[in-house]
Image (cartoon, coloured by chain):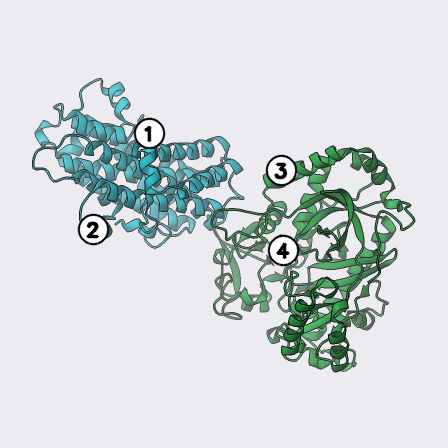
Amino acid sequence: MLSRTADNLYWMARYVERAENMARILDVAHRMHQLPRDRGAPDGLEWEPALTISGQKPSYEKRYDEFATGHVIAFMALDPENPSSIYSTLHGARENARAERFVLPTEMFESINATWLEMQSLNYAKLVEWGFREFFEWVKERSHQFRGTTVGTMLQTDAFHFTRLGTFIERADNTARLLDVKYHVLMPDEDRLDEAVDYYQWGAVLRAMSAFKAYRMIYRDGIKPRQVIELLTLRKEFPRSLHHCFNEVLDLLETLAPNSEGTRLTGEMYSRLRYGKVQDITRRGLHRFLTDFINRNSMVSNEIAKTFYLTPESQGQSQSQGRK
Amino acid sequence: MPSSPFDEMTRPDGRIRKPYSIYNKWVSKVSSELLSHKNSQADLFFRRIGITFAVYGDTQGGERLIPFDVVPRIIAKDEWDILSKGVCQRVDALNKFIHDIYHGQEIVKAGKLPKSLLKNNDQFRPEMVGFEPPKNVYVQIAGVDVVRTNESEFHVLEDNLRTPSGVSYMLENRDVMTRLFPELFDQHPVAPVNHYAQELLETLQYAAPDNLDEPTVVLLTPGQYNSAYFEHAFLADEMGIELVQGQDLFVDGGYVYMRTVGGPRRVDVIYRRIDDDFLDPMAFRKDSMLGVPGLFEAYKKGHVTLANAVGTGIADDKAIYDYVPQMIDFYLGEKPILKNVHTYHLDDEDDRKYVLEHLSELVVKEVHGSGGYGMLVGPKSSSKEISDYKDRILDNPANFIAQPTLALSTCPTYVDQGIAPRHVDLRPFVLSGKTTKVVPGGLTRVALKEGSLVVNSSQGGGTKDTWVLER
């Protein structure tokens, strides 16, 4: 298989996943924005994480003076100039898919192409008419459909493995970043991690990850920060957790290149997620753990690029999206 | 131009020509609703398969279909025997000609071809002088455009020796016809064409540098924005070889490799669908983003084969075309089986005088042009168009040739009013490997507009399935 083909499929999947995660991040920000604020708290603080996670805060600040809902959503959802906008990431997904349309099952290309065509027809007025929440739901649905056709129609050969690799590397990165930045904003007291906290604030985080119901079913308990951390990092059964993602990545790399450095790095991190305890993570600091994870994840991505002669993340088609 | 052109189905006296006798019985019995239904079904098939062309740059992802005609063009066995021998003979002579031009230029020394035609001809590649490709084959794939003017006369319009396209339509048209009209295939001994991809692969493998057991063959495409990209992907898929772009290949130590997920892999034969100019920025156009730096050097070292070879354009130049009959005599000692169309060269004073006086009867083309762009069809043009064109000619006469307007044969074609005759041409695809051969069939292009003689798809032409009967 040509490296270019693998590269295109890998990035196609990453871009779809990235669009979905941006919709999730904007969704949680939007939900939090609708909650009553503490007196004196600055307006629009909820929107900051969306900009921080994508690395687009500096370029946003150059264009707007305040974090107003309309501005942030227009910038992060629709702006073609912003490489992290949902518009740009869906475009990236579609261009990569288009280059490989003869490798992909027809339904897959058609699904991505249809998403892109609809995205192009949107503007801010339509978004308002549609409702922001409806728009975020739509992005998620298109992403679900993409994964559904991937699993349901693609030959399970290398092409499939590279596509799935893209999905899980991107998802792991997004889960870690979202948790990191929200945790930082909500800043729970270290010794009160096991006490029930603000239902709405933390509930919104869980909802953004489609984890609200999962939390209830697993813990049957009020929302406690330590359990939220455990769910999003260490619980294998939750499909957006770091453990789950790395379990998939490891399986895929064991199939593609069992003796590569990327596989070793993944396995090492996987062991920590598989056998680690949440108390150890929180004792040494969640931020430290997540920073380490994010670095490790991007090392894995770079090793994949090296092993299979793809475009390295730092210079390649990811355009880095302003990320470190 | 005679008032009634030769029709391949119906004689002037109303009798049906033999190759069409069964088809004519069938078509006179079926309802127009059925044909109309089959016609829309065909359209659906093509959309589903995704055979589209051009407008790849369209940001909407829009694509166009070349119109497909559901009435087959039928060619009898004895007609095909002449045609196929004729095109193979031409390609054999042209291969020898290209070798000669880049070596001793014996044909010039013998006074059969004026040296002036080579001078200042930008299709002549000085880099190729003295170089001999493996097995001494320059043109592995040729698409020879042939028109018919009467019962026994075929004329060659053009020898396409660079990167001829259209063969995917030959294959897909057949596929769609067998789905639409299985009963017609029961009644006609139609020679199959499906093995074309296999023959092409064998031709390419044969062209490999010496002593390779299993050469690696790839197809080099300019990429998805090229109008023939569908065909490139289709052929690569049919042959089971990689479809590569310039960026997928690199040259190391004089050998060519492709970047695969398993590491670099040696490439021995490149079926390139990129023009010479864009092949290698180190050897040709420096601004080419499509090519592979160092490719030409690897080629000249004999480490990789390019099919077709570099510099074949010298032989399908419209000014050189005139001399193909002489080439056949000179290199093969044979009589040309197919006729040339008489060509007037506008840089020749007598020719120019004649042409300028008879523009309304002639077809004028640019020497290096293709695709039906920039040509003048005298009988179909207004006096304003003719006088504008005259100015263009006088600006640079050497850039033009003129030919008499041929009475292209017509074939029954399904149009809005039912079945009606429309003008057609034919492009058979000639492969030169161990032997020179041609798959029985080709791409029939049809001018769908009544009376029109321009069959190019860019100018509103369509295609037909071409049936060669085996008995």
How dense is the environment of label 1, judged by Cα within 10 Å: few (below 14), some, or many (20 and up)?
Answer: some
Secondary structure of the residue carrying tag 1 is loop
- The residue to which callout 1 is attached is A239
Q: Amino acid at mark 2?
A: Glu
What residue sits 74% from the left and 33% below the top?
A: B34
Do labels 1 and 3 touch, CB within 8 Å?
no
Secondary structure of the residue carrying tag 3 is helix
- The residue to which callout 2 is attached is A61
Horizontal relation, residue A273 to residue B117: left or right: left
Secondary structure of the residue carrying tag 2 is helix
Chain A hue?
cyan
Horizontal relation, residue B463 to residue B301: left or right: right
Chain letter for green? B
Q: Nearer the viewer, residue A39 or B82?
A: A39
Q: Nearer the viewer, residue B15 or A305?
A: B15
User: As displayed, is residue A324 above or below residue B289?
Assistant: above
Q: Amino acid at mark 3?
A: Leu
Chain under callout 2: A
In the image, are marks 4 and 1 on the same chain? no
Horizontal relation, residue B114 to residue A304: left or right: right
Q: Amino acid at mark 1?
A: Pro
In the image, are marks 1 and 3 on the same chain? no
Q: Amino acid at mark 4?
A: Ser
In the image, are marks 2 and 1 on the same chain? yes
